[in-house]
Image (cartoon, rainbow, N blue to C red):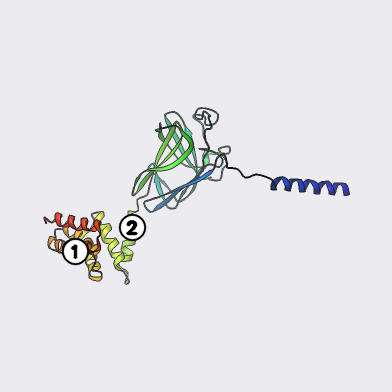
Amino acid sequence: MKLFTIACAAAFCLSVGIANAQINTPAPSPSATVSQSVGLAKITVEYSRPSLKGRKLFGTPLAPYGQVWRTGANKVPNLILSQEVTIEGQKVPAGTYGLFTIPTETEWTVILSKNANQWGAYEYKQSEDLVRFKVKAEKPAKTEEYFTIEFTDFTPTSSKIAIRWENLQAKFTVAHDPDAQIMAEIQQKTTAADVNEGTLSAAANYYYDTNRDLNKAYEWANKVVEKEKEYWTYYLRGKIAAKIGKCDVAIADAQKGLELAKKANDGAYILNHTNVLKACGK
């Protein structure tokens, strides 16, 4: 018994010694995280970045055509959505999803799985799919040594997510239209008893940018100028006034604002006020 105890203790010490003696080296497939705001949603992708290291990839056992692929290395990439978005036209609720693909030479099937905690595709189940869709396979501008997922083709309310490695890439569109949220917030905050000029200015700008009730936007801008007479508030009211044909107000505001902007040496607003004057024929 004593010899057994000594042997066990020695084995334990050896295992601890080996663990402590391990050397930290760079991971062969280092982890990466990319995020992008789309509309009012935050989109995040967490994934691993293996490299080719001289290997042939697509159409080989590493990434066979026509089979579910882990899409990179190690844990399946996670797509994290802060709000409900549309992905290739399909609504996807806020949450965390596993990102699988089925690549071919001409098109990829992209799969969002409700099971995000998977190591590779070994236990992938189609029954756990939330959505799947097909996108065209493309040739990247150059051979990609490192597996890459990135956001491209931005607009204020959409972006593409590009998946690229070796000599193939696929892109799919993620979109979030925040209009309903913004309008609800405007309704709530502009009618509050303690509404401030910052809120009114933001609401007026949104109505102006989306060509909504410009008379309401002008009413808010009037209140802003009453509280704060600055070159940026004169520009707010002036541009709205010009758009609804109140050029007497627009010209007066632009002239006042232009003088203040020149004193502040603010080139952007000098140009803004000049454009209001031009819109009204001055």
Image quarter (top left, top right, bottom left or bottom right) of the C terminus: bottom left
Please state which amino acid type lies under the numbered disc 1: Glu
Left/right placement of residue 155 relative to residue 167 reads left
Q: Which element type, helix, strand or loop, lies under badge 2? A: helix
Q: Earlier in the sequence, mark 2 or mark 1?
A: 2
| Disc 2 versus disc 1: nearer the observer | 1
Which mark is drawn over residue 182? 2
Vertical relation: 28 (above or below) 41: above
Residue 1 image offset from top left, x and y in percent = 88, 48
- For residue 122, what is the image quadrant? top right
Camera sees residue 1: no
Residue positioned most to the bottom: 193
Please state which amino acid type lies under the numbered disc 2: Ile
At 42% from the left edge and 36% from the top edge, which residue is drawn? 170
Q: Which element type, helix, strand or loop, lies under badge 1? A: helix
**Residue on which the image places disc 1:** 259
- For residue 251, what is the image quadrant? bottom left
Q: Residues within 10 Å of mark 1 (few under 14, many from 20)?
A: some
Of 242 and 115, which appears nearest the observer?
A: 242
Of 171 and 29, which appears nearest the observer?
A: 29
Vertical relation: 120 (above or below) 217: above
At 22% from the left edge and 62% from the top edge, which residue is drawn? 261
Q: Residues within 10 Å of mark 2 (few under 14, many from 20)?
A: some
Vertical relation: 143 (above or below) 149: above
Left/right placement of residue 270 relative to residue 14 reads left
Left/right placement of residue 229 relative to residue 180 reads left
Residue 55 image offset from top left, x and y in percent = 53, 29
Camera sees residue 194: yes
At 53% from the left edge and 32% from the top edge, which residue is drawn? 53
